Amino acid sequence: MSIVVIGNGMAGSRFVTEVRARDRETPLTVFGAERQQPYNRVLLSNVLAGVAGPDQIGLVDPAWYGRNDVDARLGVEVVRIDRAARRVHASDGSVTPYETLVIATGSTSFVPPIPGTEDGLPPGAVAFRTLDDCSAILDAAASARTAVVVGGGLLGIEAARGLAGRGLEVTVVHLAGHLMERQLDPGAGKVLARTLGRLGIRALLDANVTGLRMGARAGAPGAGTAAGGTRVTGVELASGDVVEGDLVVMACGVKPEVGLARAAGLEIDRGVVVDETLTSVTDPAVRAIGECSQYGDVVYGLVAPAWEQATVLADVLTGADAGARFTGARQITRLKAASVELAAMGETHHGDDDPDVEIMQFADASRGTYKKVVIRNDRVIGAILLGETSTAGTLTQLYDRAAPLPADRLSLFFPGTGGAQAADSPVRMPDAATVCHCNNVSKGQIRACWEKGARSAIEVAAETRASTGCGGCRDALEGIVAWLDEQESAPVG
């Protein structure tokens, strides 16, 4: 069986490495439209902020492909799928046959159809999605003093805090009434806006961008100029106001990249429609994973479900576990940055007026803290932790497993209440507890890795991949390793 993978991003590259971990013989070819090694898109905001370099967010070393007999076509884009002949045609003129085709084309930036974007983004405006986008933003930011970020979702907040970390005055312009409305309720959105304000980030809400403002801006080398010396100098709002900025970052969300799949005649809803084995419902020789795939009515836009799909598909195709199935995933959003920590999961938008649920809430806007747990039938169905996230592990476990709540419900907000130890401490955490949700790594797996000789968080991460996704579990991983070290060195008797 020969496998061809279209897409070498976070889902495609993970699938390729999972296949080779199980099967060294199957011919494997992967096409990546980007020339760079696969990288962690979740950490692009760290590159913007200057706390990580592009070489520090890589997922697969380019030399790995040769060592593992993978035909990697980096910088080569597939332009057509011939399902009848089971071949893919690429931008370099090559034609590659396949027995199984895996589509992992991910998503592309959504740019609203507003005046000024008809022929693509003009100089001074950049989307935020890829490492090349990140490089373009940094080039422009080097000579900029102010920036406008269009979009106050997760992507926009990450871009804004990255630019603010470089000293720019940043304004986030958001269409909705509060930030990150898909994950947060209005109360949490208000606290988040206040927290960002302390970081020098202004939020304009209920603000409809109707166009890009063009003009001449002197003294902006590196930001680019269009014909006639004009470039973007800000955004125009429906209210008639103009928000000026030396740089405009478009972070209005993403959309599944399904052009190739649609042209090949595969069934598309929002993504490529697949079943529990990640097989296209149109063609049994075609699979799809990651942000371009749709299982049920859901397109998963987070890294953990994409990596879970890659693992399931590798198990199925190599025969390592022919019965493996993807039956859906709970989506947990994590944001961990300087002065901004957030965990959100499940149904967060219920209010006190909903008779079917119980709401626990705590807010301290002056400290940037907001906590909310939504309970139904003694089970956590949603939660928000903003500003102080020490109980995120406990809540995530309760949410993931639909487990009964503890008798002391205050411990969901305040670990150690009533003299009890923190529920997240390694002492209290069972081995089955999931520490890294991006990679589905349990405390027991970390313990087993430590017992085999990995004595640092870096070594454990290299073996288990824990903390290599969003990075939100890094503190927990380091805490577990430190606790294990303490147990080894503790005196006996």
Image (cartoon, rainbow, N blue to C red):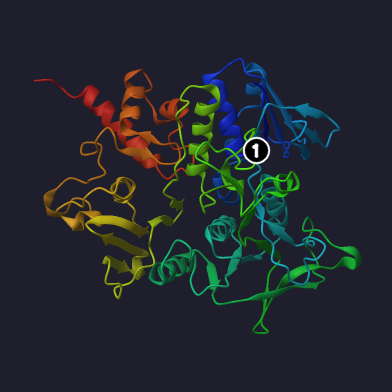
Give the x, y percent position of residue 7: 67, 38
Residue in the picture at 29% in, 73% down:
352
The answer, for residue 13, to whether it is visible in the render is yes
The spot of residue 332 in percent (x, y) is 42, 51
**The disc labelled 1 sits on which kind of residue?**
Asp
Comparing 16 with 86, the one in front is 86
Say which element carries label 1: loop
- Give the residue at x 27% y 72%: 355
**Which residue ends up furthest to the left in the rendered image?**
493
Residue 206 position, x and y percent, is 55, 77
Residue 51: give x, y in percent of width and height.
55, 45
Is residue 189 toward the left or the right of residue 382 in the image?
right
Please name whichever residue, 356 or 17, is drawn nearer the observer in this view of the structure.
356
Q: Nearer the viewer, residue 248 or 320?
A: 320
Eyeballing the image, is 7 above or below 352? above
Does residue 57 show up?
A: no
Residue wearing tag 1: 283
Q: Residues within 10 Å of mark 1 (few under 14, many from 20)?
A: some
